[in-house]
Every structure is written in structure tokens, then in C-alpha cells.
Image: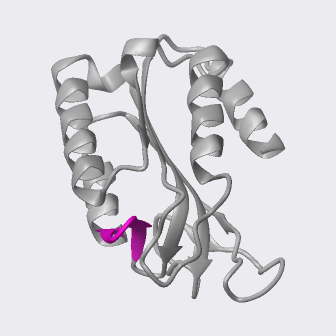
Amino acid sequence: MKWLVLVLLLLSSAARAETRWALVIGNDRGLSHEVDLAYAEADAKKMHALLRELGGVAPENATLLLGEDAATARRTLVSLNDRIRQSNPAQATLIVYYSGHADESALHMGETSFELSELEALVRGSSAALRLVVLDACLRGGLRAASWGRRCRSSGSSSARRWMG
């Protein structure tokens, strides 16, 4: 969590005037065979508060989803992109944070999945000038190395991969 505070401090010291938008998602529940997580939703609440208090995201531009399904997350991101498009996108930053279960192809939100390819398309398709995605996920098999992120050396078992992008 310390590195996230550093990211927030860097974001808050940006020289140009901009509007920041955030979608923060936390889900303790994954697919039926996955053990419920103890802190994913709590971590999302903390990140939501940090983005508003230190990260320069106005309360009306910070959306928090807890325990929601993939369809709700998808609709919310599409709506957020619409709001960014109607504002001043050249001065906009989009931040998407997810805490919960995932595998190499999807985020697991209860019994639903949000495909990473779809998340990538929605984020890349945003008109925001700057787009940041943070996936704090309990991974099964690790996320795929993609042009929008890279895999780092594992700090433990193969299901506990760290990502940087």
C-alpha cells in the first residue's frame, strides 16, 4: 500500500490543471471455487478515500463499487467514460483500481467475470489524456503480459504474482 501512496503523491503534484476521475472496485467474493477474501473491499474503501483526500479526485468524480457484479462495473466505466468525453478530456485523468480475485483472462466479481480484454478496450477507448489501471488481485495463474502491463517476478506461489504497468 505504501507504493500507492507514492503514486498518489506524484499525481497530486502534477503541474497542469486537470480533472481526475476514478472508478474503485472491491469484491471479496470470487467464483464459487475461490475462497472469499478478507480485505479486498476494505482496501478499495481505503483507496477511494486516498484518491479523494490526496489524489486530487473530486468526490463527485470518484465512484466506489463494493461487492458488485461485472455488468455493474462495466456499465459504470462506460458511464464514467461518457462523463469524461463531455468534460475536457484533454485535461482528464482516468484511474481504475480493482481489488479482488482474477485469473489470466478476467477479474472475478462474485459469480461474474469482467474480461481483461474488455477492460483494456474500455480504458484505452477513454478520451482521457492519461489513463492508469491498478489491479490488486489475488491471481490464479497470473495475468497475461500485455502491451499495457508487464509481469514482475513472483514473490511467492504462482497464484501470488505482482504486476506493474
Q: What is the magenta range?
A: 106-115
Above or below residue 134? Residue 61 is above
Residue at left offset 26%, top offset 17%:
88
Count of labels shown? 0
Front residue of this view, candidates 30 and 24: 30
Above or below residue 128? Residue 143 is below
Toward which corner of the image does residue 138 lie, by quadrant?
bottom right
- Considering the whole magenta stretch, tell me its main secondary structure: strand
Front residue of this view, candidates 23 and 87: 23
Could you say where residue 112 lies in the image, as x and y percent from the top left? Answer: 30, 68
- Image quarter where the N terminus lies is top right
Front residue of this view, candidates 22 and 65: 65
Could you say where residue 29 lies in the image, as x and y percent from the top left? Answer: 49, 63
Answer left or right for 157 relative to 93.
Answer: right
Above or below residue 74? Residue 46 is above
Could you say where residue 139 lies in the image, as x and y percent from the top left? Answer: 59, 76
Task: Find out whether residue 10 is within the magenta segment.
Answer: no
- Image quarter where the C terminus lies is bottom right
Task: Find out whether residue 110 is within the magenta segment.
Answer: yes
The chosen color scheme is one colour
Answer left or right for 146 relative to 73.
Answer: right
Residue at left offset 43%, top offset 79%:
32
Front residue of this view, candidates 132 and 139: 139
Above or below residue 31? Residue 130 is above
Could you say where residue 158 lies in the image, as x and y percent from the top left? Answer: 70, 89
